[in-house]
Amino acid sequence: MMTEHALNKVPEVTLIFWIIKIAATTLGETGGDAVSMSMNLGYLISTIIFAAIFLVSVVTQIKAKHFHPFLYWTTIIATTTVGTTLADFVDRSLGIGYSGGTSILFFLLISSLAIWYWSNGTVSVNNVSSFKTEAFYWITIMFSQTLGTALGDWTADTAGLGYEGGAMIFSALLGLVVAAYYGTNVSKTLLFWTAFILTRPLGAVLGDFLDKPIENGGLALSRYSASVILIIFIIICIQISHHQSGKVLKIKTK
C-alpha cells in the first residue's frame, strides 16, 4: 500500500483537494481573462501563451519521478487558464457559440475517458504513475477544464441564470455527487470525474462573478487583484495539505 502511494503522482483526494481545485479553476477564469481581456492580447494569443506554459509544466510533471504538490497544482492551473482562453476563442472568435462549444468538448472528454478505459481497463486515479496513464490523465483534465469554461458561460449567459444562479446550480450538483458518494454504491471513480468536471464550471462562474461589471451581475473586482488573492490562497492550502500528508505518512511508517 505504501509503495502504491509513493508511486502515485497525483494528490490524495480529500476535502482540501477539492478546495484547491475550485480555487484553481476560479483562478483560471480570472487569470485567463486578465491576459486576454485586461491586457488586450485576445483569445488566440492568450491561448498560445497559456498552451506553452501548459506544455512545459505537463512535460515536467510527467518526467518527475515523484509527486511534487506545487508542480502538480501549477499544471492544473495551467489547464484552467488555457481552457478559459481556448473555450472563449472557440465559442466567441470562431462563432460556434456556447452550446456548440460545449457539445464538441463534451464529446472529446467522453472520448478521452473511453479510450483511456479501453486501453487501461480503468480510469481510476489511485495509481497515476506510468507515462501512458499520466498522458491520459492530463488530456482528460485538459478537455474537462475547457468544457467547464464553455458550460459555465453557457449556463450564466445563454441560459440566463447569471453568475450567482450558475454557482448555485453547480454547487447543488456537486452536493448531489457528495450525497451519492456517501449514500450509494455508485462507482467512486465515476463520481470523482463527475465532481472534477463540475468544479470547473463552478470556478468559471465564480471567476466571472468576481471580475465582471456590476451591471452584468458581477462584483467588478480587478482581475489582477482577484488572481493574486487566489494564488496566495492556493499556496496556503497546498502548504496545509502537504503538512497534513507528511503527518499521516509519519504515523503510517511508525
Image (tube, grey):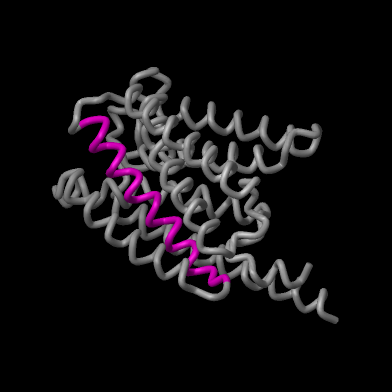
Quadrant assignment, res 196: top right
Residue that appears at 55% across and 56% down: 133
* Relative image position of residue 120 (x, y in whole percent): 61, 49
Residue 228, by quadrant, is: bottom left
Is 129 situated above or below 146?
below
Q: Quadrant of the C terminus?
A: bottom right
Q: Could you tell me which residue is drawn at 23 percent across and 38 percent down?
A: 89
Question: Is residue 18 left or right of 184 when viewed as pictured?
Answer: left
Please name the predominant secondary structure of the magenta segment in the image. helix
Q: What are the residue bounds of the magenta stretch?
A: 67-92
Within the magenta stretch, is there residue 71? yes
Viewer-proximal residue among 118 and 150? 118
In the picture as drawn, the residue positioned furthest to the top comes out as 159
Q: Tell me the quarter of the picture where residue 92 sits.
A: top left
Task: Name the residue rendered at 65%, 38% in the picture.
Answer: 190
For residue 201, above or below residue 14: above
Give the x, y percent position of residue 4: 71, 67
The residue drawn where x is 20% and y is 26% is 95
Q: Is residue 190 above or below residue 12?
A: above
- The single residue placed furthest to the right in the displayed view is 254
The spot of residue 158 in percent (x, y) is: 34, 19
Residue 48 percent location from the top left of the image: 22, 53
Q: Answer above or below: position of 240 versus 175.
A: below
Horizontal placement of 219 versus 116: left or right?
left
Q: Quadrant of the N terminus?
A: bottom right
Task: Return the residue nearer the eye: 155 or 231.
Answer: 155
